Amino acid sequence: MRKFVIIFCLALVGAVAGGFSYWYLHSTPSQDVSAVAPPINFHTLDGKTISLQNLHGHWVLINFWASWCAPCMNEIPHLVQAQSDYASLGLKIVGPALDEADAVRPMLTRFHINYPVTADFTGGDQAMRALGNDRGALPFSVLIDPDGFVAERILGGMSAEQLQSLLNRHLGNG
Amino acid sequence: MSLIRLTGAALLVVSTAAAANTHLFDGPASANDLLTAAQAFSMLPVERHGQSLHLSWSIAPGYYLYRQRIKVETLAPSAAGVEAIRLPDGIAHHDDHFGDVEIYRNDLEADVPLSATPSAPLRVRVTYQGCADAGVCYPPQTVVQTIAP
């Protein structure tokens, strides 16, 4: 009986260690950072200018995407849902597309995008790199806290669960 | 406890920990593991091979180029006799958003026939675009090159 207890305890330790390493490694793609977000302006498709500095006081999720990027398209429905679910907690999503306006406009209707979107290849690329994406790959998301500090950077598409986990971690439950 | 039982217990610990890590790579891509587009899709300089231009790419493992997103355009001279690029058959790839497409992995070689022998330097623009299996895509890459007659 004693041997069984020892083996059980070792297995339990193994499971906890495995679970912890799973959680730790799963969370490494998003980098916790504490840098002030650079002052960036986005010019939306409907002619408005969004300044990151003017969004202080809100949680801002900037999602860089493009119509030629399949992982980006997979992620958009989750972002649309998140904008609905977390708006009351102060979330504002901005979607700069590294793309042509003519390619982006049909996506607004197709995905019922409920947050401002821009279409500027050069400007989007510069903003993305200024926010820390030195690989230049998409999708790339940056969560900025109400004080203007970068809370997390995420390179690659997030599932609905991963996005929800990110937002719950910082904003609370939507 | 005998050595055999201790070993068995240790193996159980390791296997349990390993089982918990089965889905380690399901999440978004890690920036540290990703190549830049130039590293992932290394394009060699365009070469003149008789009556054609020869293009070649070395594509890193885990990365791919879309067949339909490879383009060659003539910038100068305007009537250079550059025909459409001849690409080999690619690997069938289904994408939820783009449907059935073809992709290339590893090495890619293609030719662009010339209908006339150029008498002046030929300036061409090559565009290509690809993604990584890790779940990210790279913006279209553009290379402009001048080829001597």
Image (cartoon, grey):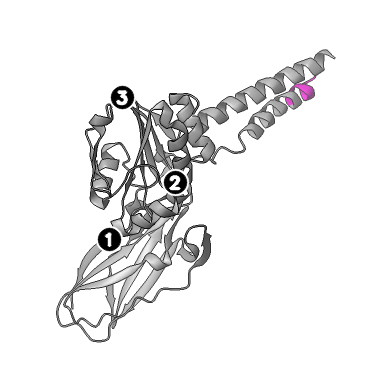
Find out whether the residues at labels 1 and 2 contact each other: C-beta distance under 8 Å.
no
Name the image quarter holding residue A149: top left
Give the residue drawn at x 62%, y 38%.
B22
The numbered disc on residue A76 is 2
Question: Which image quarter: residue A140?
Answer: top left
Residue A106 sits above or below residue A90 on the image: below
Task: Check whether the beta carbons of the residues at disc 2 and disc 3 lie within 8 A of each other.
Answer: no
B6 left or right of A17 in image: right
Could you tell me how far apart the alpha carbons at marks 1 and 2 are, in whole angstroms? 27 Å
Residue A47, labelled with which disc? Answer: none
Q: Amino acid at mark 3?
A: Gly
Question: In the image shown, does B46 or A95 lie closer to the viewer?
Answer: A95
Q: Quadrant of residue A70?
A: bottom left
Pick the residue in front: A119 or A30: A119
Report the residue at 33% width, 61% height from top: B43
Q: Is residue B89 above or below residue A20?
A: below
Residue flagged by tag 2: what amino acid is it? Ile
Q: Chain of mark 2?
A: A
Q: Nearer the viewer, mark 2 or mark 3?
A: 3
**x, y percentage for residue A111?**
44, 50
Residue A43: image location, x then y, percent:
24, 45
| Residue range of the region highlighted in magenta in the rendering | B1-7
The residue tagged 1 is B142
Would residue B1 be visible to someone looking at this image? Answer: no
Q: Position of residue A9 (x, y in %)?
A: 72, 17
Mark linked to residue A57: 3
Query: Disc 2 to disc 3, how far (Cα)?
Result: 24 Å
Amino acid tagged 1:
Thr
